[in-house]
Amino acid sequence: MLWIALALLLVGLAFVVLMLISGESEMQTPENEIIPEAGPKLPAALENYLGSNGVELPPAIVYVAIAIMLTGIALSLLILPIKVGVLAAAGVVFIAFSLVRIIGAQRRAKMLEQLPSFINQVTRRLSAGVSVENAFADSVETLERPLGTVMRRVVRRVHYGYDLHQAFEREARVNQLNEFDVLATALRINEQYGGSIRSILDDIVDILRMQDSGKRELSAMTGETRFTAFVLAVLPVGIAGYTFFNDPKMLTDMWNSSGGQQTLIAAIVMQLLGVTVLWRMVKSIGA
């Protein structure tokens, strides 16, 4: 069994190396050049899932992560006892899905942090007499990721014939950011009825900064609650580790008995469910 696991591990590592080599061999283009996206593509279902969670990574990195996850699942099922292996494989999958959500949340938070300063650049160019489309296109040139990647797609779509508000509506659906919907609505109203787009954009910047200030204040007020949730999540694991370190025979004897094994599996499942519930509660407080 061990040699099969090692063979699978080698296959996974070889797959990773091949993907990295193929990714490096792709033609590199400047970030400010508006051209169609090229290179290896992800399957539509996987791309839609990552997009719905706000995750945007190069295909090579995604394939590397998938190879590592599959290798971990295979090793868990082949090396460990069947019940432990199933739990370990489920843990690997749970960690992978959790990482997707965490990365997506961090990416959205970073974009919201960059958005007010970007809109300020747009309004300054509008004050100089530049058109709305050109103001957005010129402001994108010095914008860093991740917001820079999104805004370059917006400029690219406008270049291909989309209206500016339509491009923002599409990005709002992809990245699940209501702030892009607000921008799209402001641009659509300005296109249809006219008016001063600069004052609307300035109001949006003020709202975004007030929202960020409110989130920071709420995070400070709920710090004790979040720390309590962290302690409750870590405490059972810490007690189990302390018990195993001081008296490993007790847990091994418990695992070797049928009733004790079922009790430990139930405890692990309840621990995972409890951590999930606490995490969702903490996220709802911070939302």
Image (spheres, helix red, strand yellow):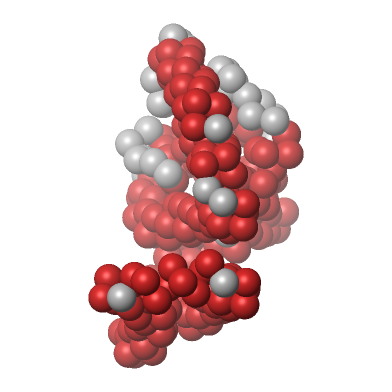
Up-down relation of residue 120 to residue 263 (above or below): above
In terms of depth relative to the viewer, which is nearer, 85 or 270?
85
Relative to 154, residue 272 above or below: below
The N terminus: image quadrant: top right
Instruction: Classify residue 127 as left or right of residue 172.
Output: left
The picture places residue 247, in percent across and down from the top left corner, at: 31, 75
Residue 183: x, y in percent? Answer: 57, 57
Q: How many marks?
A: 0
Q: Is residue 64 above or below residue 106?
A: above
The answer to whether residue 162 shows anywhere in this view is yes
**Observer-nearest residue: 177 or 68?**
68
- Closer to the camera in the image, 64 or 11: 11
Residue at the image position 55 percent from the left and 62 percent from the top: 179
Task: Kindly identify the residue that appears in the image at 49 percent across and 36 percent down.
Answer: 68
Is residue 96 among the parts visible in the rendering?
A: no
Q: Residue at point 56% right, 51% down?
A: 81
Give the x, y percent position of residue 15: 51, 20
Report which quarter residue 233 is drawn in: bottom left
Q: Nearer the viewer, residue 86 or 165?
A: 86
